[in-house]
Image (tube, coloured by chain):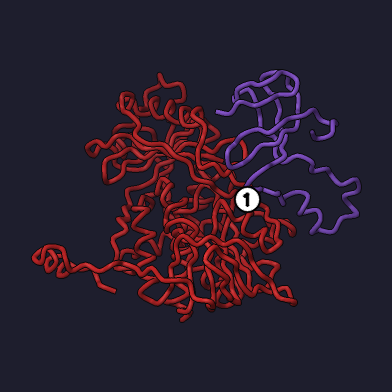
Chain colours: A purple, B red
Amino acid sequence: MLLIPCPYCGPRPEIEFAYAGEANIARPADPAALTDDEWAAFLYQRSNPRGLHAERWRHAHGCGRFFNARRDTVSDLFQDSWKPGEPAP
Amino acid sequence: MQRFSAWALARNALSGQTGWQRQWRTPEPAPKYDAVIIGGGGHGLATAFHLARDHGMRNIAVLEKGWIGGGNTGRNTTIIRSNYLFNASSSLYDHAVKLWENLSQTLNYNVMFSQRGVMMLAHNVHDEQVFKRHVHANRLNGVDNEWLTAEQAQAFCPPLRIDAGMRYPVLGAALQRRAGTARHDAVAWGYARAADALGVDIVQNCAVTGIMRNAAGAVEAVQTTRGRIETPKIGVVAAGNTSVVMGMAGVRMPLESYPLQALVSEPVKPCFPCVVMSNTIHAYISQSDKGELVIGAGTDAYISYSQRGALHVSTHTLEAICELFPQFRRMRMLRNWGGIVDVTPDRSPIIAKTPVPGLYVNCGWGTGGFKATPGAGHLFAWTMAKDEPHPINAPFTIERFRDGFLIDEAAAAAVSH
């Protein structure tokens, strides 16, 4: 089980959290202007890196808030986490 | 290839078991091949076997970064079934089951395919309705599946508890009798041996580090830890690492890789006659011929390449198993491990050409790739050799995500999703 650094509450055990997928995937402002390929890329394509991954978590059984974090997907070690809207450290 | 037979066994027994040959060679990679398969698991080796046997492509290589069968082929729970809901899926998986039925003869290698039946338990009205719909859909597609009452389910699997005092009582079950298990290592070894005998080079400890494309965009070579290998055709069969390998060719995939756990108990005498799974309370259990209970746990919530899983995920499964099978409450677990599974948005695989000429991909099997090994190998080899899909895998393209033809088996793909 991971120890996840919530930027609001501090490190808490993984079972308090819900994973919310890759970070920084903004919904296109005007979906109708996109080609089918671009829309499919937004919906379905993911970086899925072997290494550092920027991702979103929600502290579902804590403060209830979403935040961003960076974790190494090979070691599962968290590098850092930050509040939404803040620049990445 | 030295064929296995009762006669060969007897002859070698009399000569002190000194007459056996190595089952496949350990070749150095050649500078050029007609096709290269990236990934020496069951799917990759089966692809090589079918390319060599069915399509006459014998100057080919399988590149494996570790040892063959050391990834998900050696880490899964060995369940084989084809009771999927949609037409495209049931024909894909049943194609594999039909090949499984003769695989030991095809490969001259005992893969210990055992059609002991897979039973999926229903615990509530919704389960019952969904499974009955599956039963009917499967039977319309010529795939055997039948509905059992709770009493019939217990008669088929005597350790099963069905009393009303359970937290999640068993209301019935869907049973596919042709489903079962096989020996996973033997599948990798059998395909490796058969492919090697046809001239395929199986190169272990050879990680691919780059995919080279020519001015027209087509693939022309792979860079590996053991040198550059020129080839006009590359088949990527890299399971959890598919996104990484496809990234070398500049292709972004609709995949995410998750750790999926399994565990085995101490070995005991035969006590469990079939495979039982429960989606609702997440139990997944069978007994290997060695006597271990083989238990499939779930995926972790987050993407990872760690090949480990969290303890609370396997605990969750063990609690369900103890509830369903009280006789196992004092069993001790021996080993627990994880494999990295590549999951598509619709939980159906991709066996297809890619936007890059000469680059093909077989991936996205998620938590259920082992069962498809012979079928996936056959269909992927066809796709690579002919540069067009076989009718069975024609729906399983990458473009289905763009075109909206998803094959949504998320609900049917048993536990774990």
Q: Is residue B401 left or right of residue B377?
A: right
| Residue B22 location (% of width, % of height) | 29, 67
Disc 1 packing (10 Å; few <14; some 14–19; many ≥20)? many
| Residue B166 location (% of width, % of height) | 42, 21
Three-letter amino acid code at disc 1?
Thr
Residue B304 placement: quadrant? top right
* In this view, B186 is above or below B48: above
* In this view, B90 is above or below B262: below
Of residues B368 and B314, the one drawn nearer to the viewer in this rendering: B314
SS class, disc 1: loop
Q: Residue at x 38, y 76 (%)?
A: B198
Which quadrant: the N terminus of chain B? Answer: bottom left
Q: Residue at x 39, y 59 (%)?
A: B188
Q: Residue at x 74, y 58 (%)?
A: B402
| Residue A5 location (% of width, % of height) | 68, 25
Q: How many marks?
A: 1
Residue B3 placement: quadrant? bottom left
Q: Is residue B88 left or right of residue B193?
A: right
> In the image as oriented, which residue stretches furthest toward the left?
B14
| Residue B116 location (% of width, % of height) | 32, 48
Of residues B211 and B139, the one drawn nearer to the viewer in this rendering: B211
> Residue at label 1?
B344
Of residues B24 and B365, the one drawn nearer to the viewer in this rendering: B24
Residue B49 placement: quadrant? bottom left
Q: Residue at x 31, y 64 (%)?
A: B104
Q: Numbered disc 1: what chain?
A: B
Of residues B378 and B227, the one drawn nearer to the viewer in this rendering: B227
Which quadrant: the C terminus of chain B? Answer: top right
